[in-house]
Image (cartoon, grey):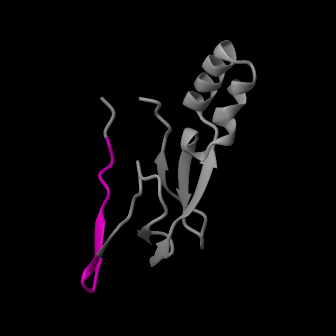
Amino acid sequence: MAEESVPLTISQGQKNYKTSLNNERESSQFFCNKCSKVQESQVDHKVGTWTLICCGIWCILTFIGGLIPLCCKPCKDVVQYCPECNQKVGEAPFSPC
């Protein structure tokens, strides 16, 4: 069995900050372990496996409709980075269901 990493929560003052932003699709504040700072994550949308599967299904149903998942941000995987050191801090794959 694969072990899942549990995100740590760092307290600074009265606020708690996550150190991992897995399965989050929006930018949010986190504590970067590499920079040792509280940062606002930088969000990047990438074409993933499910995006390509949706393109194939839409191509079968409607020819031009197959391009729709490539243009829609909600149909893409989300990868979050630290804006200062570019360390990947989270990933949220697209799931159609």
Residue at 67% x, 33% y is: 68
Residue at 69% x, 25% y is: 66
Q: Quadrant of the C terminus?
A: top left
Residue 61, placed above or below residue 94: above
**Does 15 sit left or right of 45 as displayed?**
left
Bounds of the magenta span?
Answer: 4-15
Residue 32, given in percent of the width and then of the height, sits at 45, 70
Asked if the stretch drawn in magenta spans residue 45, the answer is no
Residue 26, placed above or below residue 74: below
Q: Residue furthest top?
A: 60
Residue 43, given in percent of the width and then of the height, sits at 57, 59
Residue 95, placed above or below residue 91: above
Q: Residue furthest bottom?
A: 13
Depth check, front residue: 18 or 66: 66
Residue 91, given in percent of the width and then of the height, sits at 48, 48
**Does 64 sit left or right of 14 as displayed?**
right
Residue 82, given in percent of the width and then of the height, sits at 55, 66
Residue at 74% x, 19% y is: 63
Residue 17, placed above or below residue 47: below
Q: Quadrant of the N terminus?
A: top left
Asked if the stretch drawn in magenta spans residue 13, the answer is yes
Depth check, front residue: 67 or 94: 67
